[in-house]
Image (tube, helix red, strand yellow):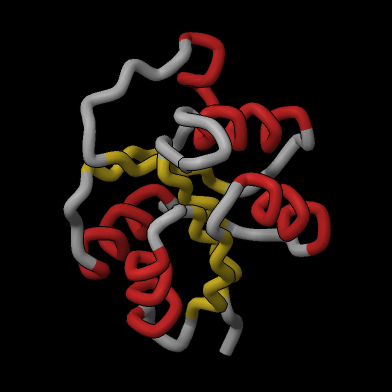
Amino acid sequence: MIKHPILIVDDMNPILKVFKFGMPDDYDVVVANNIYQAKTFCMAIRFDIVLTDIHLLPHTPFGGFELVQSLVNMKFSGKIGIMSGYAQDIPIHLIDHIDFILEKPFSIPDFLETIQGVNK
C-alpha cells in the first residue's frame, strides 16, 4: 500500500494529535507546530498535501500565509490547504496557489472528503 505523505501545520498540539493519530493508515502524517519546522520538513520530504493554519502564534500572526509563500518559492508540487477559525482575506498573490480552505471546526472525515475532491 502506498502511503500519502501529508504535512499538518498548527500551533495547537491537540489538533496535531487528532491528525497524527486519527488519519487512516494510507496516510503518512507529519506534524509541525510552526513554520520553521514546516519549511524544514518540506525541504526533506515530498508531501502530497500541506495543510496549514493561518494563525501560527507566537511566531507570526499570519504565519500560514508566510508558509504558503515559501512553498510557492520552493516550487512545491503538491496541494496546499489552509485552515482557520476566522474569516480571512487571502492575499491576492496567493489565491491561485491555495487548493482548498477548511473552516474550523472540522472533522477528519470532512478533511478526507475535501482532499479526495482536490486530488481528482
Where residue 85 appears, as percent x and y from the top left, is 23, 40
Q: Is residue 14 above or below residue 88?
A: below
Residue at 47% across, 41% down = 57
Q: Residue at x 65, y 59 (%)?
A: 47
* Residue at x 44%, y 43% (from the top left corner): 81
Q: Quadrant of residue 110?
A: bottom left
Q: Nearer the viewer, residue 33 or 118?
A: 33
Q: Residue furthest front?
A: 58
Left or right: 58 with respect to 66?
A: left
- Farthest residue toward the right? 44
Q: Quadrant of the N terminus?
A: bottom right
Q: How many marks?
A: 0
Residue 84, quarter of the rendered image:
top left
Q: x, y (%) of residue 46?
A: 73, 60
Closer to the camera, 30 or 100? 30
Up-down relation of residue 66 to residue 50 (above or below)? above
- Residue 32 x/y as whole percent: 57, 61
Q: Is residue 45 left or right of residue 9?
A: right
